[in-house]
Structure formats: C-alpha cells, structure tokens
Amino acid sequence: MLIFGERINGMFTDIGDALRNKDPKPLQYWAVKQEEGGAHYLDVNSGPAIPTDERVAAYEWMVNVIQEVSQLPLVLDSTNYNAIEAGLKVCKRPAIINSCPAEQVKIERVFPMAIQYNAGIIGLTMDKKGIPKDADNRVAFAMELVAAADEYGLPMEDLFIDPLILPVNVAQEHAPEVLESLRQVKMLANPAPRTVLGLSNVSQKSPDRNLINRTYLAMAIASGLDAAIMDANDDDLVDVAATCQILLNRSIYADSYLKVFRTR
Amino acid sequence: MSVTLVKERYSSKVGEVVLGATPEQGGTRTATVTVGGDSALPFLHFEGQMPNRPVIAMEVTDVVPAWNEMITKQIGDVINDPAAWAKKCVDEFGADLIYLKFDGADPEGENRSPEDCARIVKEVLAAVGVPIIVEGCDDSAKNNEVITAIAEAAAGENLLIGIAEQDNYKSIAAAAMVHKHTLIARSPLDINICKQLNILINEMGLPLNKIIIDPTVAGLGFGIEYVYSIMERARLGALANDKMLSMPIICTVGYEANRCKEAYASEEEFPGWGGLEDRGVLWEAVTASGVLQVGASILVMRNPTAVRLVQKNIADLMSK
C-alpha cells in the first residue's frame, strides 16, 4: 500500500501563498512532515495559485526545492503537460504523472512522455464527457488505458488506474461503484495495473471527514486499492493502511507493525 | 515446440552479513565469511543471484560433550582441548566457521567463569583463522555475563554471538554493538516473534546487517516440515522487501538431528533401523540438506562424515 502525500497543493492557503511569493519553506516543511507521517511519494500540484503561462517554470521550481530536503519520489499533478514535463526533467527519482484520462489525444501526449522519463502514469477512468456513474463504464475506460500501456510499452505496474471517487455527501451512489471498479480493474491484465484514489475527495465538506476517509480506505484496500493520494499526517488513517496490510496477510505480523510500516 | 520457463521476479533480496574481521578490519581472522545476498529462492540460479554459498560451522564445546561414540571417535583426543579440536575441524574436516558453545558455563554444571570462557575464546581464535560463532549456556543470566565478557575480550573480531531472545536481548545486543560483533536472534519457531525481535534489536541501534536469524529448527522426523514452512515464509518476506525478515538464517542442525533417537539408538535396540554409523550420519546430513533447500545460510554441524556429505551437496547445488 503506497501513500501519496496530498499536502503540497496550491489549494491550501500556505502552499498557494508560498508559490506566489517563491518561498520554498512551506513546501519543504510539508515534504519533510509528510515523509515523517508515512508518505512514500509526494503529490505536487500548483493549483490555481500560478497563472497558466507561469506553470512550466513553477513546476521546475517546486520539484527542485522539494528535492533539496526530501528523497521521496514525486507525483506531478497538473492538467498542463508542459508543466509536468518541465518537472520530470529535473526529477532525480522516477516520478508519476498525475494524470491522463482515457482520451486518445492525451494518451498520445502522456504515454510517450512517461516512457521517455521512466515515469508512471495515473490513468483516470473518464473522458471528455466526464465521470461515469457505474463500475462498468469506469472499467471500460480503464481497459482503454491498459491497452495504451500495452501499445506504448509502459510496464503494467507503472500504470495506476484511478476510478475517481466523488464526495459521498453529494454523490453517494458512486462509492460502491468505485469499489466494484477496483475489483474489476485488478482482473484486466496479468500482471494487473495498480490502482489509486484521491481519497480525501470522498469526504469533501462532510463534518466527519476523518472517519469517512478511514472507513473508505479500509474498504477500498480490501477491494484492490494499491495507493492513495491522502492525508499522510492523519496518524489514524496511516494506521488503517498499515493494519490492512496485516489483515490481508500482505505483511507478516509483528507487535510493532505500525512503527515498521512507517520505517523507510 | 519450445517451452518458456515461467520465472518469478522478486522486488528485494536477503541482506548480506559479513562474519569475522581481518587485521585491517580490527580483528585477527585470515579471511572473513559473507553470507546471504540471495535474490531468489535457494539454488534457483535461473531466477536470481546466490552470490554466497551456504557455509558450515562445526560445533566445538568447552567441556567434553555427551555425544554418541560415532561422532566422538572421529574427533579423537582433541575433544579435550577446544583449540586443538577447532583446528582439526578446519584443517581436516574443512569447516568454514567454528561454533564454540560454552555448556561448561552453566551454573548447574561446571559453572565456568566468564573470564575463563573468554580465555578459551582467545585460544580458539589463536588456533584457527576462520571466523568464530560463540554461544554461552542455557542459563540466560549467566549467558549474559559470559557473552559480555567474551565480547569485550574479543572486541573487533566481529564474532557471531548468541543468543538474543525476545525476553532477554538487551545486554547481549548492547555487547554486540559496543564491541563490534554480529548477533544471533533466536525465536521459538514463530515468524511473528522472529520479526518482532529483529525490530526490537534494531531499535536499540544494532544495524540489520549485524543480525543473523535463528528460527529454531527441528531434526528430521521431529517437525522439520513446520521449520520449513516458517523459514519459507521468512524468505518470501525478505524477497518481497520485508527488511525486518531479510537477515540470513543460521540452523543448529547438528544439535537437533542428534537429539533424535534415530541418530543415536543402537542397531541392537532397533534391528529394523539398520546400522547406527550410517544412520547417524544420514540423519544429520538429510536434516541439513532439508533446511538448505529453504534458505539456511549457516549450518551448525557436528558429525564430520555428515559435514563431508553436505559440503558435496552444497557444491552440487551451487554449480549452475
């Protein structure tokens, strides 16, 4: 189970301000803090804080300042592929591109770039028309992405299918469909693609965010989730991930398993 | 029609551990011994690397052992002198390491003093050039005193010292750390305690490449299948990047095999079992080759004839 720390995102006020002021400190603070919490990767997203025409330079700067303090690999999160490519050029460790929907034009842009920079891809089970309501259509999009990986020669374990979870307070019917999608995606190929969710989305604007995140994470891992973009500093949430490893017999139990899960 | 072999790919490998230290490294050994490093299941050379062959440590005790005559007669007069006995094991029987056990330190036996034990270790170190494994006695309080004294007297030699167990590991782990030795961590045929003990020792500050796992084994016919399953689980864990189970494994084969009645009862007592001489050798050799198949890196053995058989078995299995 891989944890992609979500906190370096311009949607958060401190990161947004830091990006505007070119102040590396908040990015570096969260890089270190998320690693301590248990993150395996750091998601990096400028959000709307940076004007579109400055994003290329911004991603290069973000990657560089984070790598000054952290050895963790990065997940470059943007819809601007030139910005992602600028980041990939300076990444010291193989990164993951976040993201590519099941649209031919974008597949043609992203998959060769992933091969060139030895990067992984988060593939979204959606196209221009948006996110499907049910599992079947999500899996159909996943299949297109799996076929693209095959065509371009991307190793299947470097493809992370994201079946896209929506907030439970407005789109409750999606939650079980996403779980079903996870189960089916793991059967699309052998070796199977990996799976990922933007976990915190499930609890947007709900008062019991942490509880919803923790419960859904356990359900999703049992359904085949391999990675989550999540709050790496919610200790109880990280404990859930660690405990799932034990209860699914993926890691051998020891009394100190919670601590070991955080050891890098 | 050509057949493509299905190969397993693993994400990690067993850690490498170096035993002994040469004069440049602060010790007096003529050469060090490296164990571990496997990147596949044992001897599957087509799936991964096995850079270091399994090694055999021969058992030497500080007091004359109550072993059966089939073994003691091969050792001969030197059985009264640990240093000469160790030298014979290396020179004549080809031992890669010496395993020195201080049964005489037991308070209920000869109650040998820690200082006297340390003196014997020095004598054995002077007699042979191979790295040495040292274990104290079965009384844990006395064992701590003995091993602490030995660790200090042989500081820098990178002995492999034991035994650290879940309820008694701190003083011996500290001795290993301070005096630069490697530690045997023993668990009672329990994969979860095995992992937990490694975690606890590592938390004290001893690096993972200074730990050897003793999972506790059993002789042929006395639960070796269970031993096999535990060792296999540990090995698959190591290959799947479980760092807390990735240490090389030591197996006290000679001790366990020779506790089995089949290894010492006479033909007169059990006519259907055949001659003891061959039976005793085979019981130990087959126990050894069983655990070799599941990842033993260090075999602690007793019967020189069995050692010879297992040396050949290892050489055969290592040839590609």
Image (tube, rainbow, N blue to C red):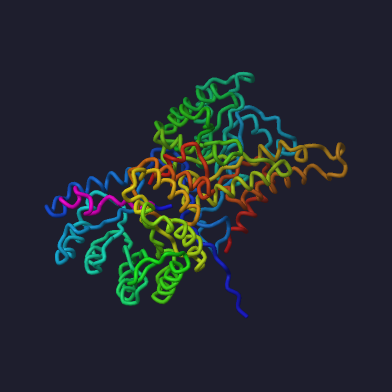
Q: Nearer the viewer, residue A140 or A94?
A: A140
- Asked if A128 appears above or below B55 in the picture, the reply is below
Q: Which quarter of the rendering shows the C terminus of chain B?
A: bottom right
Can residue B18 be seen in the rendering of this structure?
no
Magenta residue check for A5: yes
- Asked if A83 appears above or below B215 in the picture, the reply is below
Q: How many numbered circles are shown?
A: 0
Give the x, y percent position of residue A73: 31, 56
State the residue at coordinates (52%, 38%). Answer: B132
State the residue at coordinates (25%, 52%). Answer: A8
Q: Nearer the viewer, residue A112 or B185?
A: A112
Give the x, y percent position of residue B279: 77, 45
Which residues are drawn in magenta?
A: A3-17
Q: Which quarter of the rendering shows the N terminus of chain B?
A: bottom right
Give the x, y percent position of residue B265: 80, 37
State the residue at coordinates (23%, 45%). Answer: A29
Residue B287 is left or right of residue A245, and the answer is: right
State the residue at coordinates (64%, 44%). Answer: B227
Magenta residue check for A135: no
Can residue A156 be seen in the rendering of this structure?
yes
